[in-house]
Image: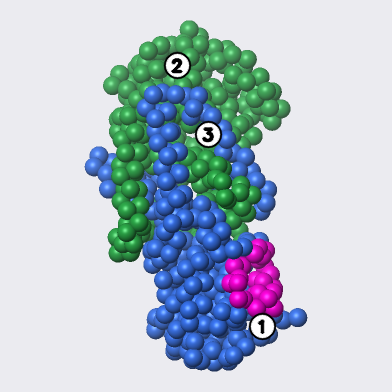
Chain colours: A green, B blue
Amino acid sequence: MLPFSRVSVIGLGLIGSSVARAVRQYLPTVRLTGHDASAAVRETARRIELVDDVADSAAAAVTDADLVILCVPVGAMAAVAAELADELPADAIVSDVGSCKTAVAQALAAVLPPERVVPAHPVAGTEQSGPEAGFASLFRGRWCIVTPLAESDSLAVARVEEFWRRLGADVERMAPDHHDRVLAVTSHLPHLIAYTIVGTADDLGQVTESEVIKFSAGGFRDFTRIAASDPVMWRDVFLANKEAVLEMLQRFSEDLSQLQRAIRWGDGDALYDRFARTRAIRRSIVDQGQDDAAADFGRRHD
Amino acid sequence: MLPFSRVSVIGLGLIGSSVARAVRQYLPTVRLTGHDASAAVRETARRIELVDDVADSAAAAVTDADLVILCVPVGAMAAVAAELADELPADAIVSDVGSCKTAVAQALAAVLPPERVVPAHPVAGTEQSGPEAGFASLFRGRWCIVTPLAESDSLAVARVEEFWRRLGADVERMAPDHHDRVLAVTSHLPHLIAYTIVGTADDLGQVTESEVIKFSAGGFRDFTRIAASDPVMWRDVFLANKEAVLEMLQRFSEDLSQLQRAIRWGDGDALYDRFARTRAIRRSIVDQGQDDAAADFGRRHD
């Protein structure tokens, strides 16, 4: 059974355009409509024939949809939902792909019928942005976390879950606030730290930026990939998931202080103990198919 | 002109075994001898025919060498150098691959003729360890930083530089203390932070380790690769490059506090400004061939 037959994607960046491409590939009979707030992005979407129809407003994009997926920055969700609310067909389901679920759930439920709202978050992405950066296989083997509201219609939830399975994702259901804590650790804190260290390295006296770039293969370059992610998206994530991020950051800072102290006092045993504990997590991530087993992420060395 | 004809590699882990394989591939007429302190590693090296001869002691490995490369953890350099000093041929040059150069230069010069010592550091590696993890192309297109002593013979320096060029590396000459500052930023601090965050995530109350692993594709998994690096090697790096690491860590902590404050007070403009500045560095690293241009490090998505 096809979960939806007329899907509307609002926001045609990396994730939105990947959803569109994945629908084309894995649900080829679905009629696809798209909209983006940027005229330049709409033009690109038309040129590359990303969807069947590109609409010039969010409202015009949803008039015929049975699923609307909001793929805009978390801070833009409320405004976009308000824009399309009046044109939404009575039986259409609204979902999203935002990285914070408590704030998005509140924003959507405030202007849309809550029983038709099913927030979700596919945990996938790259550092690139825009309608040409997306690809159909982005969600294959990745997790999509579905965080229903108390009022969400259970059939609507099941259909959204089936939709993501069709795109190749594994689906997990979670309460919005628990999602926000988990992602604070696995995604938001790593991004904050990567943005910080790349900024720190950009601003040193005795070491030049040219040296940082040349000798980045010692580890630094890994952080620059994450720190090349979309700045608007990430600004909104930190504003929307403030409490959980600050809590995790506090724990991280305490742990970093402990290692700093071990370095200052030359405590090699304390350093070794910490460094020897972390390989097991890497192994589990690779074993569970959440990263490449090849050394160095499978980067080419030739 | 062949820079050396009888090369001895002491320490047959990831880097030592990659040097051996690269010599085999790019300098095939060189006679290769190897030694490792671990009997199990020596046995593996014999089984996979990593070198022409595996010696049972460091001293026995160098009796016929014109180049000796020490590929052991930084903290083991002094003891290994002392072990082989008496057997070293009068014209043999001693180099190394350690990640800290001031400490290693002092350690080697204390027991070896300083004019024959030419410390070096190929900025390359993966998260894997041991004699079977190495590969011949590891150094291709990467930088090798050569940090001569004041007393190093200039012809010896030129021959070591030519050796690394033959293995595919670009060579840069630098003072040892400047090397240690540059690498504190581009390698040591990133590793310390990666080890810290992976440890932090391992030790949370409300978020389980299983959740951290499952949803690691949101960014966390990138850090686990670096944090899977060899714990002995990294313990020694932090003990040997203490001052420079603590200085960079101090700057990083100040920058992180500033972002923490911006999150706490909901200062979206400050967050956006920081996040928008870091893409340019990523672009330069890719432009200069120091990382893969493909999205997501070229990880496969199928």
Three-letter code, disc 3: Phe
Between the C-alphas of marks 1 and 2, the distance is: 68 Å
The answer to if B208 sits in the magenta stretch is no
Q: Chain of mark 3?
A: B
Decide if residue B276 is on the left or right side of residue A188. Answer: right
Specify the segment rendered in magenta: B144-173
Residue that extends furthest to the left in the rendered view of this protein: B205
Residue depicted at 50% across the width and 11% down the height: A83
The residue sitting at the top extreme is A86
Q: Position of residue B243 (x, y in %)?
A: 43, 57
The kind of residue on which mark 2 rests is Ala
Q: Position of residue A290 (x, y in %)?
A: 43, 49
Res A56 quadrant in image = top right
Question: Is B173 left, or right, of A277 in this rendering?
Answer: right
Identify the residue at horizontal 54%, vertical 12% (top origin): A59
Discs 2, 3 touching: Cβ within 8 Å: no
Query: Which mark is drawn over residue A78?
Result: 2
SS category of the residue bearing label 1: loop
The numbered dot on residue B4 is 1
Marks 1 and 3, how far apart in space? 48 Å
- Dot in front, 2 or 3: 3
Establish if B134 lies above or below B24.
Answer: above
The residue tagged 3 is B275
Task: Relative to A51, say whether B44 is above or below.
Answer: below
Chain of the residue under label 1: B
> Is residue B159 within the magenta segment?
yes
